[in-house]
């Protein structure tokens, strides 16, 4: 709550000083807040270590190719493009950015986020302007003459504002009848090289060319109702490229449209029997217009020649989503990804420079003074409690979704998007076995109290039991029947009743229960609310806690009686951890300590924290928090 109050206070002060909702009146320049999440004086919490600079989210290169501006989940920084390790300045952020744009004169930097547009001086990162926004900003772009800034809003509105005061010159939003498909939330925007037109992309596949002067729609195309994640103009302004995420049964692609008519010119993709192109997230044209470059959500970067449309090269650039592309005047390509890395490649695809960082942290474990973190890039990293990296392995293809330690503290299990479960010795991190577990991502894992079995849940509607140490299947339990229409996600699973039963989270406020090892269904536990249960915690006294997607926390007695709704704790898997028989830890935008009473929960204390997934050591005295923004904190709890 401390962090929330601080952000609200900061916004209130800015509004009082003259900042305004976009569009609006002219703001007063104020100092950029340098805020790092820290704990205030606390009776029960002590933060003993923190590390991780945040995963890259956006990037822009100066016109001469000498300076790179990088926005991570935690900061915006200026780097020497010829020496990526050299940081010229760095400013901390309190909100994850969504987009970054550089003014044509190179003097200012526009940084977009869900709640505001911030304009910084490129020389030293000083705040020039701050414009709070009434809707999340998906993308931002400067006009070639610098006179306008375009904002693609998730509300579906395309706004043109004046950089000096944030006042709107135009707001453009198509009517449903004007487009080939229903308008969706905007994802991207870019001006044509001559500045007379601009193009927007949205989540329903619409690609719309607008007059920057008159604000009217000039042409439109549609990428078969697939999400358009990014758009780009060809250097001559004749073509528009749209990055398409594709569909579950089709590859990602780059759609090329005639900028004057909206007619589709070409669709660039890879669709072969043994492989196809992953969803495309970023796209750009080379400066000479002779090639098109795409970055995908599996970390690949593909270059096609144009107009031939032939694949020139493919680079396994990153282990996770490519979040940004930029091309230098001499043809070198800069890429950034959710594996935390920033890289530079020559035109042939050879790596010239790399700067590694931390990916979004998706799962954590702690015991015996050692920590493991799973990343969105599939890596599993082993650390000391002080943040020294002891080792790293490529554990999964796709994100690591869950980590679990066997009760004796000798074995770690990991589960990922690739449907695999893998075992690792603890704390050494040596491979200890693996097996395919689910059709699709494995979302949760839990050890039986005696360590003889492992339970898992997945996106395929099932929970499964596995014998250890070989992973032999014991039972497959249907939690949600697949009907082809509704989601079959089973977010979490837990053993209860000293391991004699298994509980799996599902939709409609329902927990499914089964006997162990037989898998016989038991009466379900119901909340009476139509919410999705996300996180389960089995308490030492056989009571059961479940957090739903609204933040409500539900408690059941050992006999299955519902004690009721207990409070508001973020509902996502990995947000809760038991310290001991009487204390619970919860992580969100902060870290909170709760007392487990006979009838429910009582808040003991809350402190500011990076927030994210959380795990506690067996002695209940150490807690690790892994942030989706790409950092880790270690806390002592009294």
Image: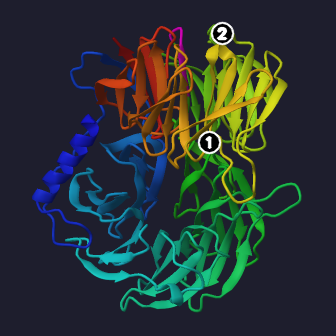
At label 1, counting other C-alpha atoms closer than 10 Å, the crowd grade (few under 14, some 14-19, many 20 or more) is: many
Viewer-side residue, 343 vs 8? 8
Q: Residue at x 15, y 70 (%)?
A: 26
Q: Quadrant of residue 30?
A: bottom left
| Disc 1: which residue | 506
Colour mode? rainbow
Q: Are marks 1 and 2 in contact (CB under 8 Å)?
A: no
* Residue 521 x, y percent position in the rendering: 74, 32
Q: Quadrant of residue 3?
A: top left
The magenta segment is 364-369
Q: Residue at x 45, y 15 (%)?
A: 579
Secondary element at tag 2: loop
Above or below residue 619? Residue 91 is below
Please indicate, yes or no, whether residue 527 appears anywhere in the rendered image: yes
At label 2, counting other C-alpha atoms closer than 10 Å, the crowd grade (few under 14, some 14-19, many 20 or more) is: some
Q: Residue at x 35, y 76 (%)?
A: 159
Above or below residue 184? Residue 31 is above
> Is residue 593 shown left or right of residue 509?
left
* Residue 183 x, y percent position in the rendering: 51, 78
CA gap, disc 1 to disc 2? Answer: 31 Å
Name the image quarter holding the N terminus.
Answer: top left
Viewer-side residue, 103 vs 173? 173
Is 538 part of what is drawn in magenta? Answer: no
* Residue 444 x, y percent position in the rendering: 64, 32
Above or below residue 624? Residue 186 is below
Name the image quarter holding the C terminus.
Answer: top left
For residue 291, the mark is none
Secondary element at tag 1: loop
Please indicate, yes or no, whether residue 613 appears anywhere in the rendered image: no
For residue 410, the mark is 2
Viewer-side residue, 210 vs 172? 172
């Amino acid at each position: 709550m401390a962090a929330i109050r601080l952000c609200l206070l900061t916004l209130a002060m800015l509004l009082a000083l003259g900042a305004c909702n976009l569009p609006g009146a002219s703001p007063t320049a104020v100092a950029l807040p340098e805020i790092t999440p820290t704990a205030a004086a606390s009776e029960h919490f002590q933060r003993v270590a923190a590390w991780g600079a945040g995963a890259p989210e956006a990037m822009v290169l100066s016109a001469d190719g000498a300076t790179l501006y990088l926005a991570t989940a935690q900061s915006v920084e200026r780097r020497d493009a010829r020496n990526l390790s050299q940081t010229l300045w760095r400013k901390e952020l309190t909100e994850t950015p969504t987009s970054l744009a550089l003014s044509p004169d190179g003097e200012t930097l526009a940084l977009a986020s869900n709640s505001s547009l911030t304009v910084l001086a490129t020389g030293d990162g000083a705040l020039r302007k701050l414009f709070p926004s009434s809707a999340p900003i998906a993308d931002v772009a400067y006009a070639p003459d610098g006179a306008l800034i375009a904002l693609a809003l998730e509300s579906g509105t395309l706004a043109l504002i004046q950089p000096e005061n944030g006042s709107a010159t135009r707001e453009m939003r198509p009517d449903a009848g004007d487009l080939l498909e229903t308008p969706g939330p905007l994802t991207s925007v870019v001006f044509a090289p001559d500045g007379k037109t601009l193009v927007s992309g949205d989540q329903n596949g619409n690609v719309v060319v607008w007059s920057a002067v008159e604000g009217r729609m000039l042409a439109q195309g549609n990428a078969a109702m697939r999400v358009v994640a990014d758009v780009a103009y060809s250097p001559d302004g004749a073509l528009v490229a749209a990055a398409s995420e594709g569909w579950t049964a089709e590859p990602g692609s780059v759609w090329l449209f005639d900028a004057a008519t909206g007619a589709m010119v070409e669709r660039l993709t890879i669709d072969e029997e043994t492989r196809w192109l992953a969803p495309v997230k970023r796209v750009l044209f080379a400066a000479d217009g002779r090639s098109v470059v795409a970055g995908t959500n599996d970390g690949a970067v593909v270059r096609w020649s144009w107009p031939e449309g032939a694949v020139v090269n493919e680079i396994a650039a990153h282990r996770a989503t490519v979040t940004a592309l930029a091309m230098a005047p001499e043809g070198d390509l800069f890429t950034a990804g959710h594996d935390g890395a920033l890289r530079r490649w020559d035109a042939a695809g050879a790596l010239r420079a790399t700067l590694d960082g931390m990916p979004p942290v998706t799962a954590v474990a702690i015991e015996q003074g050692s920590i493991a973190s799973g990343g969105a890039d599939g890596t599993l990293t082993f650390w000391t409690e002080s943040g020294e990296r002891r080792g790293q392995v490529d554990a999964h293809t796709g994100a690591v979704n869950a980590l679990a330690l066997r009760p004796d503290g000798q074995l770690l299990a990991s589960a990922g998007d690739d449907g695999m479960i893998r075992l690792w010795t603890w704390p050494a991190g040596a491979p200890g076995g693996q097996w395919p577990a689910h059709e699709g991502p494995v979302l949760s894992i839990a050890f039986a109290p005696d360590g003889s079995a492992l339970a898992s849940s997945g996106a395929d509607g099932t929970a499964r039991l596995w014998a250890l140490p070989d992973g032999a299947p014991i039972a497959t339990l249907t939690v949600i029947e697949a009907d082809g229409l509704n989601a079959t996600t089973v977010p979490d699973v837990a053993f209860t009743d000293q391991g004699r039963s298994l509980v799996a989270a599902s939709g409609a406020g329902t927990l499914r229960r089964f006997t162990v090892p037989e898998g016989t269904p038991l009466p379900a536990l119901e909340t009476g609310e139509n919410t999705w249960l996300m996180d389960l915690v089995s308490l030492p006294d056989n009571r059961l806690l479940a957090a739903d997607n609204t933040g409500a926390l539900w408690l059941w007695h050992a006999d299955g009686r519902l004690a009721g709704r207990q409070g508001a704790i973020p509902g996502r898997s990995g947000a809760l951890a038991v310290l001991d028989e009487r204390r619970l830890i919860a992580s969100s935008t902060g870290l909170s300590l709760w007392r487990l009473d006979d009838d429910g929960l009582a808040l003991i204390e809350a402190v500011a924290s990076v927030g994210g997934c959380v795990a506690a050591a067996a002695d209940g005295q150490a807690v690790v928090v892994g942030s989706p923004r790409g950092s880790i904190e270690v806390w002592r709890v009294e």
